[in-house]
Structure formats: structure tokens, C-alpha cells
Image: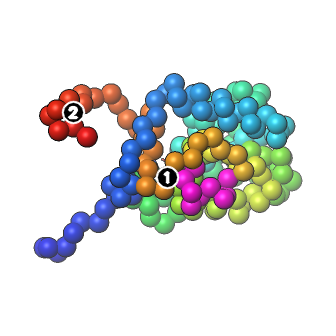
């Protein structure tokens, strides 16, 4: 309707930007693995797709875990969160490895923000260990192990979602 302010996306509401390079992400995943190594061993890694796939690959490689499963959840359409949809659940085989409750399983995601995604997966695997690379305050209580906390009003830009581009000089009004 005319005159109505357009709804702001989560990214626009965030205000602050936290861009992460591939190098930085790899280092942060390795740091996460150092911590997880003290908690394991784990029978399998469960990646929350799609964002959890990259950290899950790095963490599984470092921990020597070769059984990797996915739980496929869609919520953000680019940067607006809608209803959570489970597109694919955890496999029967992985469920069995976790004794039905997730014991000895490691859930990996790139971040927790509101915590909605993490909460849903925790309900599926209440005894699993939940690790993310980054955490915002609202989602933080859900995570067992993470590396870096950023403020709730920060939007994290991951390397697989971004590309190098020209940035105008500060004197020309660049932020
Ligand atoms: O704590 P929450 O507020 O639930 O947000 C965190 C989730 O949001 C992002 O996934 P997204 O739904 O954007 O899908 P993607 O992993 O396929 O990019 C991110 O990878 C987490 O899974
Ligand atoms: O790329 C992303 N950055 C974020 O900060 C975020 N929060 C939820 N979903 C997100 N995706
Ligand atoms: Mg995700």
C-alpha cells in the first residue's frame, strides 16, 4: 500500500556487518575442533544444511569422523526468516548410532541467531552435542560449543554468500 514503510529484512535490521573470509572461517572451524576434541569422540556429524555443510566438512576432517548426515531445514529466504521447514530429517542409520536420542552425535551449524533452527534440531536429538562457529546472544544458550559471539544486531556475511567487489573510498562517502 502507498505510504507504508517496506518491511526491513533481518540483514537490514542488523545494522552491523561482520564479513568472514574463507581463511578466517577455516581458522575458526579449526579452533572449534580443538574444543570439540576434548568433548568427543563422536560417532557421526550431523550438518544442518546448508550453512552447516562447510563447517561440518572441516570439523569432521579434523576429528577423523567419516559418517556425516544432514538435516535439511529452510527458514531464511535470503535474509527474511519464515516458518521452519524440515525438508529432510535425520537418517535412520544416524539415529541408530545415537541410540535414538543423539548420544555421541555432533550437530554442526555455521551460526545460531534467534535459535529457532537449533532448537528444532535439538528436539530431534536431545542428547547430541550442538556446535556452531558463531553465536548471537538469543541463540547462544542452545549451543554447547561455539567460537565467536557477535551482537544480535550483527549480520554475518559468509564467504560462500559473498564476492569481492569494488568499494568506493571513504572520502566519497563510503561507510
Ligand atoms: O538461529 P536462527 O535464527 O534459526 O538462524 C540460524 C540459521 O539460519 C541460517 O540458515 P538458513 O535458514 O538461512 O539456511 P541456509 O543454511 O540454507 O543458508 C544459518 O545457517 C542457521 O542454520
Ligand atoms: O548469512 C547469514 N548471516 C547471519 O547473520 C544470519 N542469521 C541468520 N541467518 C543468517 N545468515
Ligand atoms: Mg542454516
- Residue under label 2: 170
The CA distance from mark 2 to mark 1 is 25 Å
Of pointers 2 and 1, the one earlier in the residue sequence:
1
- 2 and 1 marks in contact (CB < 8 Å): no
Judge from the rendering whether residue 126 lies leftward or rightward of residue 138; answer left or right: right
Q: Residue at x 64, y 37 (%)?
A: 56
**Residue 10 appearing in the image:** yes
Judge from the rendering whether residue 42 lies leftward or rightward of residue 169; answer left or right: right
- Specify whether residue 107 is painted magenta: no
Whether the residue under disc 2 has CB within 8 Å of ligand 2: no
**Residue 73 appearing in the image:** no
- Residue under label 1: 151
Q: Position of residue 53 (x, y in %)?
A: 58, 39
Q: Which segment is the magenta one? A: 135-143
1 to 123, vertically: above or below: below
Q: Residues within 10 Å of mark 2 (few under 14, many from 20)?
A: few
- Specify whether residue 136 is painted magenta: yes
Q: Secondary structure at mark 1?
A: loop
Q: Secondary structure at mark 2?
A: helix
Q: Position of residue 94 (x, y in %)?
A: 77, 47
Question: Most extreme residue toward the top, as rendered?
Answer: 23
97 to 165, vertically: above or below: below
Q: Position of residue 95 (x, y in %)?
A: 78, 52
Q: Residue at x 67, y 58 (%)?
A: 142
Q: Classify residue 77 by image quadrant.
A: bottom left
Q: Position of residue 14 (x, y in %)?
A: 39, 55
Q: Residue at x 35, y 52 (%)?
A: 15
Q: Quadrant of the N terminus?
A: bottom left
Amino acid at each position: 500500500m502507498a505510504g507504508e514503510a517496506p518491511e526491513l529484512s533481518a540483514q537490514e535490521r542488523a545494522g552491523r556487518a561482520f564479513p568472514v573470509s574463507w581463511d578466517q572461517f577455516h581458522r575458526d572451524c579449526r579452533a572449534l575442533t580443538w574444543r570439540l576434541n576434548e568433548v568427543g569422540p563422536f560417532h557421526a556429524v550431523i550438518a544442518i544444511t546448508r550453512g552447516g555443510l562447510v563447517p561440518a566438512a572441516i570439523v569432521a576432517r579434523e576429528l577423523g569422523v567419516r559418517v556425516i548426515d544432514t538435516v535439511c531445514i529452510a527458514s531464511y529466504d535470503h535474509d527474511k526468516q519464515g516458518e521452519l521447514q524440515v525438508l529432510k530429517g535425520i537418517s535412520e542409520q544416524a539415529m541408530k548410532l545415537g541410540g535414538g536420542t543423539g548420544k555421541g552425535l555432533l550437530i554442526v551449524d555455521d551460526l545460531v541467531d534467534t535459535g529457532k533452527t537449533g532448537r528444532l534440531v535439538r528436539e530431534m536429538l536431545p542428547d547430541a552435542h550442538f556446535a556452531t562457529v558463531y553465536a548471537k546472544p538469543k541463540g547462544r544458550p542452545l549451543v554447547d560449543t561455539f567460537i565467536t559471539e557477535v551482537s544480535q544486531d550483527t549480520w554475518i556475511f559468509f564467504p560462500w554468500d559473498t564476492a569481492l567487489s569494488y568499494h568506493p573510498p571513504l572520502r566519497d562517502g563510503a561507510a
